[in-house]
Image: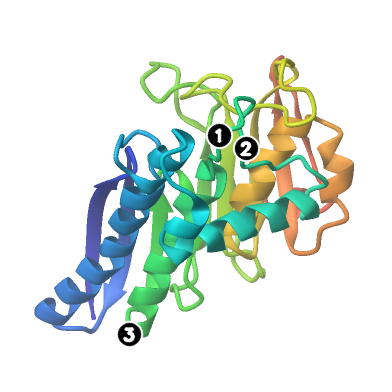
Amino acid sequence: MREFDHLEQCMGTVFRFAGRTDLDQPAFDEAIFRACSKLHAADEIFSLYKPESPLSRLARGETSVAECAPIVDEIWDACEGWEKITDGWFKSFTPQHTFDPSGLVKTWAAREAVQVLEQAGVKDFALNAGGDVWLADALIPGINWCIAISKPITIASPDSGVLTVFDLNNTRMRAVATSGSAERGNHIWNPKNPDAVQSELVQVTVIADDLVRADVWATAAFAEGPRAIERLNREADLEALFVFADGQLAGTDGLVPLFAKS
C-alpha cells in the first residue's frame, strides 16, 4: 500500500485526489487518467467560458438540447429534479434565461471520477473538488475524516484560515460543500427574486451523504437565506452551517455533534 496525491486543474479550479492504493504505478496512472478524463469531458461540454462548448452554443441559440450529447439532456433533467426538491431555490436558469448547470456539474463530474477510481480498485481516498470534499467509504478512519471549513473570505487575504473543523468519523456523512460570496462575489442569484442581493449570509456549508446533494443544497440554502435552516432540518443525513454577514453562526439541529472536539 502506497500513498498518492494527484492534482488536476480543470473547470477553473483544482481537483485533489489523495489516499492510498495497492495498485502498481502503471495501473494507478491509467485509473487516475480515466478518472480525470471524466472531469475534462464535462468541462468541454458544460463550460460557458468555452465559446464552442455545446452549452455556449445552446446559450447563443445555435443548437438545441436534442442536438447535444445525451448527457446534456440528463443534466437538464437532473437540474429540474433538484429544482422541485428544493422548492425552486436551486435553479439552473440564470436571470438572463441561460441554462447554467454549474451549481451541479462540478460535483456531478467529481462523483463520476470517484466511481472510475473505485471501479479500478482505488478505495481508500478523498477528493477535494475546488473546496467541495468527498470521502470514500473505505477511507482509513481517524484524522482523514476531519474536514476543515475556510473562513468566509478569499484565500488570498492575509486573514484567511480555518473557521472550524467537522469530524465525520462514525457518521453517514461523506460529503461537504460550501457556497458563498468570498471568492466570486454575489454570483448566486435568488431564483424567486432575481433583483435581490444576498446581504444576510456570506457562506453556507452543507454536510451530507452525497456530494451532489451537498452541493445543490448549499447553493439553494444560500439563495434562500436563513429561512433555509428550517427546510434543511427536514432533510435526513444532512446538516448545515450558516455564516452571517455580521460574523454570527447558525446551523441545523444536528450540527453541533459534528464539530471536532480537539
Camera sees residue 143: no
Q: To which quarter of the image does residue 18 belong?
A: bottom left
* Element type at mark 2: loop
Neighbour class for label 3 at 10 Å: few (<14), some, many (≥20)?
some
Q: Which of marks 3 and 1 is nearer the N terminus?
A: 1
Residue at (44, 23) in percent of width and height: 160
Residue 152, horizontal then vertical, whole percent = 56, 25
Camera sees residue 168: yes
Residue 237, horizontal then vertical, whole percent = 74, 64
Q: Name the residue under label 2.
A: 93
Contact (Cβ within 8 Å) of mark 3 with mark 2: no
Which of the two residues, 112 or 76, is positioned nearer the viewer here? 76
- Distance, label 3 to label 1, CA atoms, is 40 Å
Locate residue 40 relative to residue 164 in the image: left or right.
left
Q: Mark 1 points at which residue?
A: 98
Q: Which mark is residue 121?
A: 3
Locate residue 16 relative to residue 214 in the image: left or right.
left
The kind of residue on which mark 1 rests is Thr
Contact (Cβ within 8 Å) of mark 2 with mark 1: yes
- Distance, label 3 to label 2, CA atoms, is 38 Å
Residue at (50, 43) in percent of width and height: 102
Select label 3 or label 1 by which is in front: 1
- Distance, label 2 to label 1, CA atoms, is 5 Å
